[in-house]
Image (cartoon, helix red, strand yellow):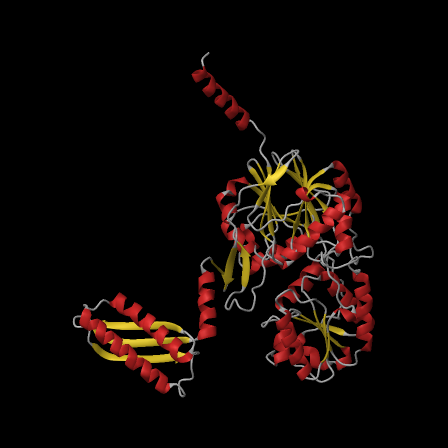
């Protein structure tokens, strides 16, 4: 055989070897990396994808007009035929909040714990989608087997019942997602399943994806039991009405509040739509136990003395439309703040919400309310594990590879350091950005291709993929203002028949700036007259000229360039 025939044969052999190499397990995130919220992760092998969580995050104050931010699921839509199910770790909004929008685009079964599915049902009912989605309740002993992948669970402790870690068995070993967790050895609910965690770790874990939220905080996260004691002590010191603000989904906290109200002989008033739903679902599932007659309608609040009233409400994050914000501002129809009221914030501000929370606190204090907030009162503890919790999880699971998730970059980086402290080498820890993938084989792992990812804005219940450009325009208008230039032009001769008239909003005060605007009209008229002498009228050219000359003029005169909106009516 000569050299000319040998080479193609070798190439064919290499191609066969390449084609027969085993495919990787691919792990990626569409939300939850470099940010707090919007959690969504994927585990993929051959023709099967398991999705974990579908959360939202709330916009920063600069994103005017935006209600929520959800993951971009373009990649999942393109690969919808591979998706076996969407598995939920627990029922917080940053893990289930995007479901109504995701399920509009993907028809996939949804799996979650009992309370999680209860909250999902309420959410889908609100969006009139309940009958369109297949919902499955799982328990910690359940296992769902697919062709190549299998999914099972272990119970964790978080600030909401029915929080689970998810185990995905692959041909190369298990991929474990912790969900949000801490190790609470005196929990208010069922304890975490430490034996299952240890068993999963003992069988060999290919990769661990673990919550990084509190990776900067030393020690263990305090127990919820300690918070319950502090709530009762605080209630006993209050003479007037108590307004208690917390997350509606923090069902453990709600039961602690009920228990304290019973011991302090207070009736409970629930205000806020999401809080109403949380109490209803919690009672139906047995997580909230309230004696008959303790819950009263807000309309009957004046029938009782102030020391007999406890108001449980939404608004612990300073949300403008939440119950507490409306009460603080005097906009609530039934409840106002009286001197002597005590308002308790039982939550920590989500990053970006601090300014809103402080504004509500100031408003309450101006109304002579006694406001209790901050960690020094022990009225709140995190549901996320501190550094010692995270190291304990790493020790239980003992993964071959580690991917820190759920946190801003500095949190992911600190979690990486913890993993190295527990024995992992740096080359086995992957710090990812959204859309980046890790391809994991039986004995090696590497960074893979990048898939589409990003943010989708939700405004008034609708997804708006191009909303980012609109937000940028809103920011420009808010910072620089707007100048509207209106004129009527003879399309044949280029003669200005009326105008130009200049109107401004948010740029300069009209009454004080009339000389400035009159000079602008004169300058513009002169420039356009010169243009008409040189060339035939072209509306597009005139619009560009108006925009350019007015920005140049105002920058020179005022030092700022507003948003210019020219309007030319052409008469033929």
Q: Quadrant of residue 50?
A: top right
Residue at the farthest top position: 1
Using the rendered image of the protein, determine whether residue 174 is visible from the camera's viewpoint.
yes
Q: Residue at x 22, y 74 (%)?
A: 530
Left or right, 38 with respect to 570, comes to: right
* Above or below, comparing residue 8 to residue 280 in the picture: above
The number of discs equals: 0
Which quadrant is home to the C terminus?
bottom left
Which residue is found at the position 50% from the left and 52% from the top?
Answer: 104
Residue drawn at x 48%, y 69% as measured from the top left: 475
16 in relation to 388, above or below: above
The one nearer the camera, 420 or 62, is: 420
Question: Residue 149, image x and y in percent?
Answer: 63, 37
Q: Picture coordinates of residue 313 (x, y %)? A: 67, 71
The quarter of the picture where residue 130 lies is bottom right
Residue 297: x percent and y percent? 68, 74
Q: Is residue 18 left or right of residue 340?
A: left
Q: Compared to 566, does 105 lie above or below?
A: above
Q: Does residue 439 appear anywhere in the picture?
A: no
Residue placed most toward the observer, 189 or 309: 189
Q: Give coordinates of residue 178: x percent, y percent.
A: 70, 49
């Amino acid at each position: 055989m000569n050299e000319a025939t040998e080479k193609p044969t070798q190439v064919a052999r290499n191609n066969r070897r390449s084609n027969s190499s085993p495919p990787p397990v691919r792990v990626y995130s569409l939300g939850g990396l470099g940010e707090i919220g919007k959690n969504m992760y994927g585990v993929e092998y051959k023709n099967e994808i398991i999705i974990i969580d579908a959360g939202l995050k709330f916009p920063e104050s600069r994103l005017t007009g935006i209600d929520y931010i959800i993951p971009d699921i373009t990649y999942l839509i393109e690969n919808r035929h591979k998706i076996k199910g969407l598995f939920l770790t627990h029922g917080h909004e940053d893990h289930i909040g995007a479901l109504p929008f995701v399920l509009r685009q993907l028809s996939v079964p949804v799996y979650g714990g009992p309370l999680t599915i209860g909250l999902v049902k309420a959410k889908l009912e609100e969006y009139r989608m309940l009958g369109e989605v297949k919902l499955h309740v799982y328990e910690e002993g359940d296992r769902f087997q697919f062709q190549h992948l299998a999914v099972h669970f272990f119970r964790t402790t978080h600030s909401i019942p029915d929080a689970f870690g998810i185990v995905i068995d692959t041909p190369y070993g298990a991929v474990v997602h912790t969900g949000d967790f801490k190790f609470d050895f005196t929990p208010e609910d069922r304890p975490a399943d430490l034996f299952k965690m240890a068993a999963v770790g003992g069988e060999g874990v290919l990769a661990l994806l673990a919550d990084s939220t509190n990776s900067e905080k030393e020690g263990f996260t305090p127990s919820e039991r300690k918070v319950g004691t502090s709530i009762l002590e605080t209630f006993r010191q209050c003479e007037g009405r108590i307004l208690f603000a917390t997350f509606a989904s923090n069902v453990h906290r709600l039961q602690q509040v009920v228990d304290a109200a019973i011991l302090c002989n207070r009736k409970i008033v629930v205000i806020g739509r999401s809080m109403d739903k949380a109490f209803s679902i919690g009672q139906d599932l047995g997580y909230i136990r309230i004696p008959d007659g303790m819950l009263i309608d807000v309309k009957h609040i004046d029938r009782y003395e102030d020391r007999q009233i406890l108001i449980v409400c939404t608004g612990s994050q300073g949300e403008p439309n939440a119950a507490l914000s409306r009460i603080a501002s005097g906009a609530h129809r039934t409840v106002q703040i009286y001197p002597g009221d005590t308002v308790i914030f039982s939550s920590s501000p989500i990053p970006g919400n601090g300014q809103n929370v402080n504004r509500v606190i100031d408003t309450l204090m101006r109304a002579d309310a006694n406001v209790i907030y901050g960690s020094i009162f022990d009225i709140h503890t995190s549901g996320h594990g501190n550094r010692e919790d995270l190291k304990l999880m790493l020790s239980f699971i003992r993964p071959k590879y580690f991917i820190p998730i759920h946190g801003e970059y500095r949190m992911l980086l600190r979690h990486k350091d913890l993993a190295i402290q527990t024995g992992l080498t740096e080359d086995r820890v992957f710090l990812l950005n959204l859309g980046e993938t890790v391809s994991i084989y039986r004995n090696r792992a590497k960074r893979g291709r990048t898939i589409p990812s990003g943010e989708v804005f939700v405004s008034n219940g609708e997804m708006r993929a191009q909303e980012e450009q609109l937000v940028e325009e809103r920011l420009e208008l808010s910072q620089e203002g707007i100048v509207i230039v209106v004129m009527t032009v003879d399309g044949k001769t280029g003669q200005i028949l009326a105008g130009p008239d200049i109107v401004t909003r948010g740029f300069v005060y009209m009454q004080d700036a009339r000389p400035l605007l009159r000079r602008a009209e004169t300058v513009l008229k002169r420039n356009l007259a010169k243009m008409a002498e040189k060339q035939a009228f072209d509306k597009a050219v005139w619009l560009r000229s108006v925009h350019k000359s007015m920005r140049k003029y105002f920058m020179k005169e005022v030092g700022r360039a507003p948003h210019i909106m020219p309007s030319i009516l052409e008469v033929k």
